[in-house]
Image: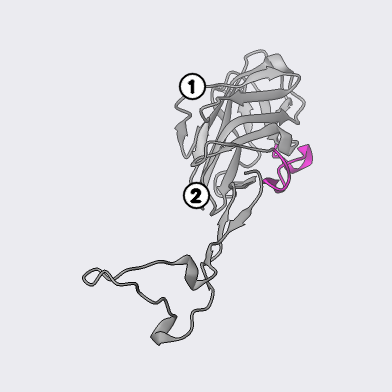
Amino acid sequence: IRSARTIKFEISDAKDIEAYGQNSGGYVVITGASGATWVTDTSVVQTSGQGSLTINWDTATNPSATSYTVGTEQAKIAAFKFSASSQEGIKVTKLKLTNGGTITNSHYQNVQIYVDGAAVSTGVVGSSSGGVITFQDENGLFTVPKGGNAVVMVKADFSTAATNGETLKFYISSVSNVEIKGAQSNAKIDSLAANIAITAVDTAAEATAQTVKGYGNLTI
């Protein structure tokens, strides 16, 4: 099911029910409440469908602009908040982050995601290609609980080859850069705007730049 569907059942006619007395074995006449004439009885409408996901900056933990010296390991670059709808939990199986900064690809590495403060248990790290970092695990990089949130912190190492003034910042350029499954259904959910909403995290201008300061200074 790729979109919401509804179902309901009804008993249209008394003839659709056949009942006999437990002791007498005699045929039981079917009536409505208090002996009233039977009328069609319809169930409550039940809705079946897949979950959806909203991604925003996590305002509580998204790092402000910071200067890091070259060689800094696991510097905080960005924090996103993934929120699942009340329909079902969401497994994120693929996530692509785009670097909107000026840093040369070879000047940063070991980009990792931490979910709710813990390194992703699969140990999957991003592979850099053209400024795009890809994380992928078909079993799920992490799961966003039904009606709840998951905070994803992105960290990276700055190479000792990085130069003063280079910047690194990540954003999610398109919903096609996020692939998800239903946590309960385990069925793929299409990467469409109807299923995945990215709010204010989809352009370089909206991302906060982290800057390479260069080497420290010593005053004697």
Disc tally is 2
Dividing the image into 4 quarters, which one contains the C terminus? top right
For mark 1, give the secondary structure.
loop
- By secondary structure, the bulk of the magenta-drawn segment is best described as loop
Instruction: Please tell me which residue is depicted at 53% across the width and 62% down the height of the picture.
Output: 9
What residue is at 67 percent from the left and 24 percent from the top? Answer: 133
Can you identify the residue that label 1 sits on? 123
In the rendered image, the vertical position of residue 160 relative to residue 32, given as above or below:
above
Residue 135: percent from left, percent from top: 60, 25
**Display colour scheme:** one colour
The picture places residue 30, in percent across and down from the top left corner, at 41, 76
Q: For the magenta stretch, what is the residue range? A: 191-209
Disc 2, SS: loop
Residue 199 is a magenta residue: yes
Is residue 62 visible from the viewing direction of this image? no
Residue 146 is marked as 2
User: Whole-percent x and y of residue 86?
Assistant: 53, 54
**Amino acid tagged 1:** Gly
What residue type is disc 2 on?
Answer: Lys
